[in-house]
Amino acid sequence: MPKTIVVMPAYNAEKTLQKTIEDIPKDSVSEIILVDDCSKDGTVALARKLGLTVIVHEKNKGYGGNQKTCYTEALKRGAEIVVMIHPDYQYDARTTDVMTKLIELGVCDVVLGNRVRTRWEALKGGMPWWKYLANRALSGLENTVTGQNLGEWHSGLRAYSRKVLESIPWEKNSDDFVFDQQFLYQAAAFRFRMGDIPVPARYFPEASSINFRRSCVYGISSLWVMTLFGLHRIGLWHSRLFDPK
């Protein structure tokens, strides 16, 4: 069985961390690494109590910056498969072993959790209607531009093979939320096999979610990354995001 490490980019996750950890199939992972981005609550103390490997940033590095620490540490510790799970209980961590199995079998190199299998499930799970519409529109465009067929491009539940993390220059990506989109475009540019599995949408007060203004900035940034990818692919613009390591 390949060594699987779960990484958790955390910020103020004290209220939801334990429930998230309890959902992870115990025999499916070797280690859980939580990287705390200067939380103001008891996230670090609880994580240590739960027996997690805890890394604390001295200053806030942002969502993308947090992931950079996550993947650096996971590779350093010999991970063959890395699963990113948000510790806010928005994603169903019970599916961890299913995601890793697809990579272990060689079916996929990248696996995402898809929250929008059907419209009624996503909205019933609490996804705001404007986020649903934006997700559908952007995901449709992103699939068209890259030739992929993912259910959604904006999931925070992801599994990567070691080869993916060693090939993609994710260190050059943004420290903000658009890091996730840059990573997927890089995976598409490098011809890695991407797939997804259905997971329920969970929106509730304790789950982290960016507001409307930040969502607009994220959407515009996603469109810009799409443009860079398209121009790079047809040879009109060279972007260092798509240079191999």
Image (tube, rainbow, N blue to C red):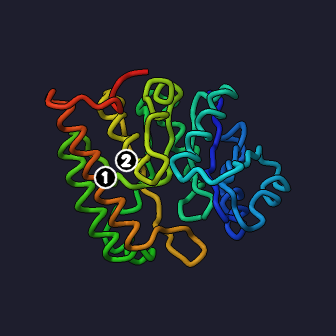
For the residue marked with disc 1, what is the amino acid? Ser
Asked whether 34 or 159 is in front, the reply is 34
Q: Earlier in the sequence, mark 2 or mark 1?
A: 2
Q: Which mark is residue 193?
A: none
Asked whether 216 or 130 is in front, the reply is 216
Q: Residues within 10 Å of mark 2 (few under 14, many from 20)?
A: many
Asked whether 48 or 122 is in front, the reply is 48
Dividing the picture into quarters, in which one does residue 108 lie?
Answer: top left
Percent coordinates x, y for residue 113 in the rendering: 45, 52
Percent coordinates x, y for residue 83 in the rendering: 57, 42
In the picture of the structure, the residue carrying the numbered disc 2 is 181
Q: Secondary structure at mark 1?
A: helix
In the depicted structure, whether residue 62 falls above or below residue 99: below
Identify the image quadrant of the N terminus: top right
Percent coordinates x, y for residue 86 in the rendering: 58, 56
Percent coordinates x, y for residue 162 in the rendering: 53, 27
Q: Which mark is residue 222?
A: 1
Q: Residue at x 63, y 43 (%)?
A: 6
